[in-house]
């Protein structure tokens, strides 16, 4: 038996197919992955992401500490704003990607991946050094995501959030707190929506309220097809400790504005830029019929590459993948799918954004 | 509980087999298999050719995974269900009907005796769960 979120029994009652994910018993789907995917692109879907790791950083040096640990710069945050960043090792490789929320002076919250929990906590603890801070993991909190073009209006119809104009106005990467609930306009689907961090005992109630508003429960299967169509990386697949943000379509998440800021991995990235970056993460759309998966070899003129994630994109109606390939001007490549060489188009990400196909 | 029609025969690799009036057999994958795999998005149908029992004869792909289909008997594949290239989801909605995969001329009708009946297939499915 794996770890279970506070919503586990609800998922069972709703007919979820439960699978193991990073040691957690999580819903893969509730009947049809394709239907759940389409609900999020066209209406509103509900995700239990309480398996993810929440860590609060508290203390007068919290900002300085995070400016050292993260490749993006928390200095640019105002209260009530969040940002997406990678956390790097000394070689510039990605230890994890995360979102950090600026809750109050001396108080930041990180949400990191569940599969990297132990590694991340060890790393965060290892580098507290001379900073006056304390780290607080928050396993008592649950996270519910509501995503889709109707997520906003449906959430506002729940009893918990009725008449909250402040939520109606919340812009991407902004958040607010109400009692002990944090509502952020963030997500992993490429659609409008929210991620809500709240005490475990309140999560069941909120989930049921959302279902009453006809927000459809969606599992990890749909979460993966949605994020891939949205061109969003999955740590462990699309990047890991052997890849830098510059090779992972995440150069934009590294902030260089303050030349005096030292952060772990900075020198390695500078060296990599000076030597020339010869790999890139791109999108692929399969032209022939088939399905792209991870670890499929591919060929461009400049050499070999490999898919890092792949799936069938339900909104596109075609197989798509993220792939790490040599830097190239080519617009097509050949992918080896079970011994046959099939043609794929090389595209800029994302494939889909706000329900629109862009490739 | 998955549906296991009593009049069909089955393989341990979750194909079903029906002996038709014209002497051909029709082959598909079971309700249990389609539930395990999830929403189908692509089917690679086999070529029209002679196969031995156990030969790889096509692939069904769901969003989650690709799964090889194995010929249940020795014989010749004489027809494939072309409709599945446009609507692979028929395997999910009607695995024993419109979701059929291919039809074969059996090489030797005694191969059919080797297949599992519904009860034995039910036991086999139960034993695979853990």
Image: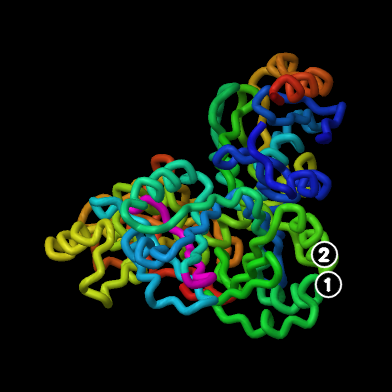
At a point 74% along the width and 49% down the height, the residue shown is: A7
Classify residue A22 as left or right of residue A329. Answer: right
Residue drawn at (40%, 67%), measured in percent from left and top?
Answer: A63
Whether residue A101 appears in magenta in the rendering, the answer is yes
> In which quadrant will I find the N terminus of chain A?
top right
Provide the residue span drawn in magenta.
A94-105
Q: What x and y, as percent, mark residue B1? A: 83, 34
Q: Which SS class for mark 1? A: helix
Do circles 2 and 1 both sit on a common chain?
A: yes
| Chain holding disc 1 | A
Furthest-left residue in this view: A275
- Residue at 60 percent across and 34 percent down: it is B69
Q: Marks 2 and 1: which is nearer the front?
A: 1
- The residue carrying mark 1 is A159
Q: Which residue is drawn at 78% across and 39% down?
A: B96
Q: Which of A272 and B59 is in front in this view?
A: A272
Which image quadrant is residue A70 in?
bottom left
Q: What is the distance, in whole Å, between disc 2 and disc 1 at their CAs?
A: 7 Å
Of the image marks 2 and 1, the number of the one nearer the N terminus? 1
In the picture of the structure, the residue carrying the numbered disc 2 is A209
Q: Would residue A351 be counted in the magenta stretch?
A: no
């Amino acid at each position: 038996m794996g770890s279970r979120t506070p919503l586990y029994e609800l998922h069972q009652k709703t007919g979820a197919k439960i699978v193991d994910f990073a040691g957690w018993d999580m819903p893969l789907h509730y009947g049809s992955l394709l239907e759940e995917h389409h609900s999020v692109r066209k209406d509103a879907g509900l995700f239990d992401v309480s398996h993810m790791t929440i860590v609060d950083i508290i203390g007068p040096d919290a900002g300085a500490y995070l400016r050292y640990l993260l490749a993006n710069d928390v200095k640019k945050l105002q209260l009530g704003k969040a940002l997406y960043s990678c956390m790097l090792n000394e070689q510039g490789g990605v230890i994890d990607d995360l979102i950090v929320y600026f809750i109050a002076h001396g108080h930041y919250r990180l949400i990191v991946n569940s599969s990297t929990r132990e590694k991340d906590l060890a790393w965060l603890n290892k580098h507290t050094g001379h900073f006056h801070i304390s780290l607080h993991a928050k396993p008592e909190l649950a996270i519910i995501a509501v995503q889709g073009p109707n997520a906003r209006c449906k959430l506002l119809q729940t009893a918990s959030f009725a008449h909250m104009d402040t939520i109606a106005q919340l812009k991407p990467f902004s958040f607010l707190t109400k009692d002990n609930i944090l509502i952020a306009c963030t997500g992993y689907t490429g659609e409008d929506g929210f991620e809500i961090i709240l005490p475990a005992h309140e999560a069941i109630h909120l989930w049921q309220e959302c279902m009453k508003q006809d927000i459809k429960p969606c599992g990890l299967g749909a979460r993966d097809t949605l994020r891939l169509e949205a061109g969003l990386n999955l740590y462990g697949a699309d990047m890991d400790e052997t890849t830098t943000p510059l090779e992972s379509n995440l150069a934009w998440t590294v902030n260089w504005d303050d030349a005096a800021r030292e952060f772990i991995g900075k020198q390695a990235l500078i060296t990599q830029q000076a030597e020339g970056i010869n790999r890139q993460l791109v999108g692929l759309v399969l032209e022939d019929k088939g399905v792209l998966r991870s670890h499929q070899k591919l060929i461009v003129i400049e050499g070999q590459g490999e898919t890092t994630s792949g799936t069938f994109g339900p909104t596109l109606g075609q197989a798509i993948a993220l792939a790490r390939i040599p830097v190239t001007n080519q617009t097509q490549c050949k992918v080896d799918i079970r011994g046959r060489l099939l043609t794929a188009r090389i595209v800029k990400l994302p494939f889909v954004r706000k329900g629109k196909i862009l490739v | 509980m998955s549906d296991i029609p009593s009049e069909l025969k089955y393989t341990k690799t979750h194909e079903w087999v029906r002996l038709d009036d014209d002497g051909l057999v029709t082959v598909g994958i079971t309700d249990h298999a389609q539930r395990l795999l999830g929403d189908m998005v692509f089917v690679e149908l086999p070529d029209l050719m002679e196969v031995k029992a156990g030969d790889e004869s096509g692939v069904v792909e769901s969003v989650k995974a690709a799964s090889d289909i194995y010929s249940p008997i020795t014989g010749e594949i004489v027809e494939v269900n072309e409709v599945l290239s446009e609507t692979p989801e028929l395997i999910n909605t009607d695995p024993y009907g419109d979701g059929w995969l291919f039809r074969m001329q059996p090489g030797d009708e005694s191969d059919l005796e080797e297949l599992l009946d519904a009860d034995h297939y039910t036991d086999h499915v139960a034993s695979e769960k853990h």
